[in-house]
Image (cartoon, helix red, strand yellow):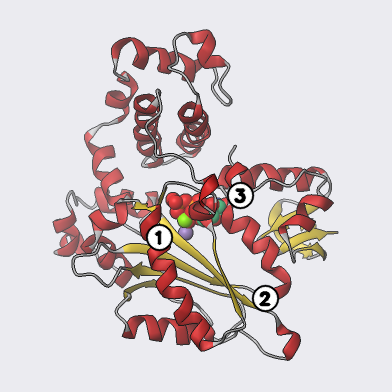
Amino acid sequence: DDKNVQPPKNGPNEDIAKKFEILKRLHEAKMGEDHHWKAFSYRKSIGPIRRHPTRIKSYKEARTIPNVGHKTALKIMEIVKTGKLSRIDYENTPDVKVRAMFQNIYGVGPKTAYQWYAAGLRTLDDLLAGRGGVTLNPGQRIGIQYYDDIQERMPRTEAKALFDIIKPVALAIDPKLEIEIMGSYRRGKADCGDIDIMITRNPDDGGTHAGVLRRLLNALHKKKIIEEDLALPEDPNGEEAIYRGLCHLPEPGSKRRRIDFLTVPWKNRGAALLYYTGDDIFNRAIRLKANVMGYSLNQRGLFEGVVRKPGNRQVKTNSGTCIAGETEEEIFRVLDVPFQAPHERVR
Ligand code: DCP
Ligand code: MG
Ligand code: MN
């Protein structure tokens, strides 16, 4: 497993990547399409900048890096020459600082952050005190309580330690469950923002994993591995359920870490594994490839014959037929893309 683990971030251009991360977060805190697209375009260049093997020395060299265009290359050269990125100061106005802080609360998006700012709120204490008539939902309250923990990424070793505790608890409920860790961990990252766990079960003996998530969560609450829920599944007894919460190692003083559970029908497990392994940029690229071929790819499978409503593409007038979804390999095969191992799935 560990031969594809990526080294921690300490490459020759890490300072540049960090500055673009700051700038990306500032754009995320602003409203409007143009900021959304700027954030996305920085998001795409950060990985390639980080992976560039030598210190960037010239504009020309910067332009050879994937997803680095003219304006980004100019900014890179500013950092290389001056150690600074003036655009950060320009974007980092007092209102944006506050909204970015609010948006770092789990479950708070740009809209809510904007409304709170407009209502005169400036600090986390303002929110907790209910100033300006604001009411927090339980998830937001937990998000503030563990604000620093949730911001922090956990070392890969800690994600593994948590998974090694949780997996046997699930298998004790039903030894036929299949349990996989997905997300950044499966891609081999040295640190993880959360733990993404998939649960499914082969129904060939008539058994089902429906209802397992509720029992697993009860058991983990009892063991005090999980003490805070952020979002409970809509139908905890269904075959498809999503849970979001916080977990922590049993040792006293352990930090709260974000955890997501996802249960999926056996026939969709490959598509779910593919989607939740990501990364999100890779997902966009492979989804686009599917669309170009006339298919539609989502976390349930690769579909043929999907018809969307003209003018409202979100609505499907024909949901199509699933042509691949049991394994990642078959999805790659139908899309005529060479199989990529999880650690290669970065764009
Ligand atoms: N995903 C996606 N689009 C989103 C959110 C998620 O395609 N808007 C997919 C790709 C992600 C995966 O789900 O890789 C898991 O989501 P996470 O937010 O947990 O992201 P990662 O696990 O990749 O990174 P992190 O270490 O920050 O958790
Ligand atoms: Mg994750
Ligand atoms: Mn996640």
N-terminal-most mark, 3 or 1: 1
Mark 1 sits on what residue?
A: 159
Res 107 visible: no
Residue occupying image coordinates x 73% and y 62% = 327
Question: 10 Å neighbourhood of mark 3: few (<14), some, or many (≥20)?
Answer: some
Local SS, label 1: helix
Please state which of the two labelled residues, at mark 3 or mark 2, is closer to the viewer. Answer: 3
Front residue of 245/55: it is 55
Q: CA distance from mark 3 to mark 1?
A: 17 Å
Residue occupying image coordinates x 44% and y 67% = 163
Mark 2 sits on what residue?
A: 265
In the displayed structure image, the side of residue 111 where residue 200 appears, left or right:
right
Residue occupying image coordinates x 30% and y 64% = 140
Front residue of 64/105: it is 64
Above or below for 25 versus 219: above
Residue 270 percent coordinates (x, y):
69, 63
